Amino acid sequence: MAIEIGGIGHSVKRKEDARFIRGKGKYVDDVKLPGMLYMDIARSPLAHARIKNIDTSKALAIPGVVAVITGKDLVPLNLHWMPTLMSDKQMVLPTDTVLYQAQEVAAVVATERYIAADGVDAIEVDYEPLPVVVDPIKALQPDSPLVREDREQKDNHIWHWEVGDKAGTDRAFRDAEVVVKQDLYIPRIHVSSIETCGIVASFDKVEGKLTVYMTTQAPHAIRTVIALVAGHLGLAEHKIRVISPDIGGGFGGKVPVYPGYVLAIGASVLTGVPVKWIEDRAENIQADSFARDYHITAELAAKKDGTMQALRVKTIADHGAFDAAANPSKYPAGLFHIITGSYPFEKSFVEVDGAYTNKPPGGIAYRCSFRVTEAAFTIERLVDILALKLKKDPAELRMQNFIPPTAFPYKSVLGWEYDSGDYGRALKLAMDKIGYAELRKEQAEKRKRGELMGIGISSFTEIVGAG
C-alpha cells in the first residue's frame, strides 16, 4: 500500500467538496438558535439630507415587532459611531444627517424576518434634502458641499500621500525624447457575491460573552473592531467569539465591518436573545463595500528607441462618505506604488489624494487587490500607448524593458524589493502557447479586409507579504 506523502511543499486536498456537492454546506442563514429574533434595516432614499424626524409608532404597533432602533437610541450607549480600519470613523446610525443613498437610518427587530420588513416599511422619516457631491474632483474644490460636518477639517480632503523623487522625475520628463500621457478612470465595481452579508449575534447575559456567526473573511479583525466599538460596555476582545461558517463568495467584500453587524450585536445585547440579520440583494449592491473608483492621470517618459525611463502618476481616490477601506497595509493608498510593475524605471513619483463624496464607503473590495489592480492596469495601459506611438510591437517593447533576470533581487525606485523573476522567459512561453506570431498574421490579414481583431498583452508582478 502506497504511503500518501503530505506536509510542506505538497498540495492540500480539498476537504469541503463532499458536503457541498451533497447540499450539506452550512452558511450563516442556516444558523438557527432558540428564541432567535430577526432584524431588518430602514435606509435613506436620499444621498444627502437632514433628518428632521423619525416616526416609529406605526412600526412598533405591528404585532411581532419587538423594537425599533434609531441613532438617538444609540447615543447614550456611545454606539452611534464605530472606527474604520483606516483610522476614520463611520456612522452606525445617523442622529441628524444621512450622507449617502441606502445609508442605514433605523433597525427593526421582530419575531419573524418578514414582520421586520413590514416594520421597516412602516417607519416614516421626514428628510430635508441637502446639496450632493458625487464627483471626487468637484468634492475637492473649495465651493463643494461639505460631506463630513463632524470633522474639524472643514473640507472633503481625507489625506495626501506620495512616494518617489518628485524633482528627479520632473527633470526626467523635461529631458525625455518621448512622453505619453493618459487620463484613466477605473469606476466603482461591486463583488456581488452569491451569498449576501449576514450575521447571527448571540449574547449570553449570564457569562457576559458574545458569540457571532458571520459570513466574514476576517474574523480576527471583526473581533477587534467589535471590542473597539463595544469595549466600554464590557465586551472585551477575550469575551467575543467570531465563527465564520461556509461563505458563498467574498472577494474582499466580506472583510469590512458593516453597521448592520453592530446593530445586530447591539440588539442581542439589549434583548438578551440571538438576533439574525441577512441583507437582501438590493442592500448588498447599494450599500456594501465597493472597489476601484480611482481617477488617474499617468505619464511615461522614454527614449525614442523605446527604453522606458520615468513614470509620473497623480490620482484622486473616491472613498465615499467614510474612509472605510479594508486595507491591511500602512499606506493609505494600499499597495498602489507597485505601479512601476515589471520595469526598471530610473525615476518615478506617485501621489494620491483621498476625497469624501456622498456615496457608500469602501474602496478596496473585489479580490482584495489593495490597489494592485489599479496599479497594474495603469502601467500596462501606458506601455501599450507607448508601443502605439513608437510603432513597436507591445510584446517586443515589454521584452526590451523587463527587469533582467540578473538584476534580482531587485529594489524598485519606489522601494519594493523583488526577490526573483524571469519576466521575458515567462512572456515568451505565453506567446508560444497562444501562437502569438500567427495571431499577428491573422490580425494583419483581417485588417486588409476591413475587419477588426484585437490582441491584448499585459504583464503583472504579484505582490505578497507587504505587511
Image (tube, rainbow, N blue to C red):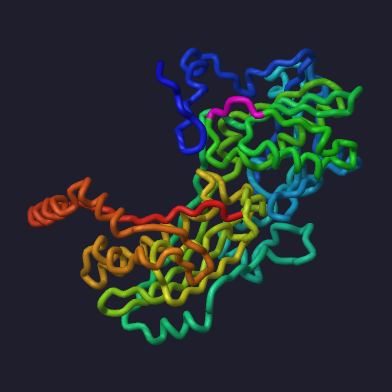
Numbered range of the magenta stretch: 244-248
Position of residue 275 measured from the top left corner of the image (x, y, whole percent): 76, 24
The answer to whether 61 appears left or right of 300 in the picture is right
Tell me: residue 145, above or below residue 451: below
Residue sitting at 39 percent across and 55 percent down?
Answer: 460
The residue closer to the viewer here, 452 or 213, is: 213
| Residue 379 is covered by the magenta coloring | no
Tell me: residue 156, above or below residue 106: below
Position of residue 375 measured from the top left corner of the image (x, y, whole percent): 46, 59
The residue closer to the viewer here, 241 or 45, is: 241
Q: Quarter-wise, where is residue 130 in the image?
A: bottom right
The answer to whether 430 appears left or right of 110 in the picture is left
Q: Quarter-wise, where is residue 134 in the image?
A: bottom right
Q: Is residue 53 visible?
A: no
Q: Is residue 422 visible?
A: yes
Residue sitting at 61 percent across and 58 percent down?
Answer: 133
Position of residue 227 measured from the top left corner of the image (x, y, whole percent): 81, 41
| Residue 246 is covered by the magenta coloring | yes
Position of residue 452 measured from the top left corner of the image (x, y, whole percent): 18, 52
Tell me: residue 254, above or below residue 208: below
- Quarter of the figure that contains the C terminus: bottom right
Residue sitting at 81 percent across and 26 percent down?
Answer: 268
Tell me: residue 179, above or below residue 247: below
